[in-house]
Amino acid sequence: MKRYYPFTYSFRARIITAVILGAIVGFVMVFLEPFDTYQAREEYKAIKLLGYAVLCSLTYLFTFPLELFAFKRFKHWTITLEVFALTLYAVLAAIFTYAYHHFIYNGPELSLKNFALFTTNFSWGFIVLMLPILIYARKRFGSLSIATPSLQEKEVELSNQSGSERIVLNSQDILFIESQQNYVNIHHLDKDGQVQVSRLRNTLSKLSGQLDNLVPTHRSFLVNLQLVEKLSGSKRKAELKMKTGSMNVPVSQPYFDSIQNLMRNRP
């Protein structure tokens, strides 16, 4: 199973995050006066210091179209893309604040060496400060994108990790698969339409590659939406009621929007 990661589609949520970042940087620069800025005695000092905060906010908004392009290109958002996006933001914020610092305070000449010194002495501290906040906000406002499941019926052979145990099933007879530690419980229909549970020593990530008709709804569940009766609850606490069987399947918050959309548009 691909390591999907929440992506923030909403530009409004981006603005909120940018304002939070700017407020934190502005508070630190103006009221705590780090990096010997307290020694400066000049006109419009607070406004100049707030310029760093404004740049940090605008840089975050500037990366939005770049992230959106990558999201549309790859059709989903992953941990790898998230790390790349955060790194890109950190690098651009360092470059822009370095240039601002140079022109506002008549710093030393622009060069890679001076940029490295500025990043080490100034930017790095803010990156460490803002990164946890940025990670939390992006997860909080983001949602997972899930590919449309296949409707094709096919026989699939599922086995344990060693290959010593195998079961053959029609892919559309599988209701859902639940992960429990080192095992998976496969809930499926038998020839009489009764729910059976087969247990294999394996992982969801290994099995998901064979089952393109199932979608993740939670880190421990893969579900066949064609055998779901309805989605109930809210984004904070939701579950899928299956057409057959008494067990409901949880839908965790990051998956909710995508699952709701797939349920609305399923044939």
Image (cartoon, helix red, strand yellow):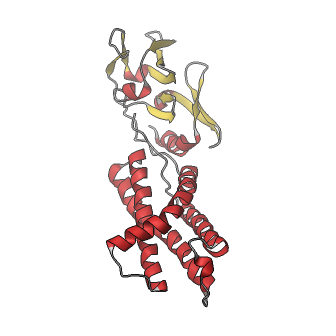
**Location of residue 50 by image quarter:** bottom right
What percent of the width, then of the height, locates residue 239?
60, 33
Q: Is residue 187 above or below residue 43?
A: above
Say which residue appears at 47% left-offset and 43% top-offset. 265
Query: Where residue 111 sits in the image (x, y, percent)?
Result: 33, 75
Q: Nearer the viewer, residue 89 or 118?
A: 118
Residue 199 lies, in percent from the top left, at 47, 13
Q: Residue furthest right?
A: 31
Q: Is residue 121 above or below residue 241?
A: below
On screen, residue 70 versus residue 228, left or right, reads left
Residue 62 at least partly seen: no
Specify whether 29 is left or right of 98: right
Q: In the image, what residue occupies the spot 43% across and 30% down?
A: 214
The answer to whether residue 71 is visible is: yes
Which residue shows up at 52% across the image and 48% down it? 143
Q: Quadrant of the C terminus?
A: top left
Task: Name which residue lies at 45% across and 46% down.
Answer: 145
Q: Is residue 11 above or below residue 75?
A: below
The quadrant of the image that shows the N terminus is top left
Q: Is residue 116 left or right of residue 131?
A: left
Q: Nearer the viewer, residue 198 or 95?
A: 95
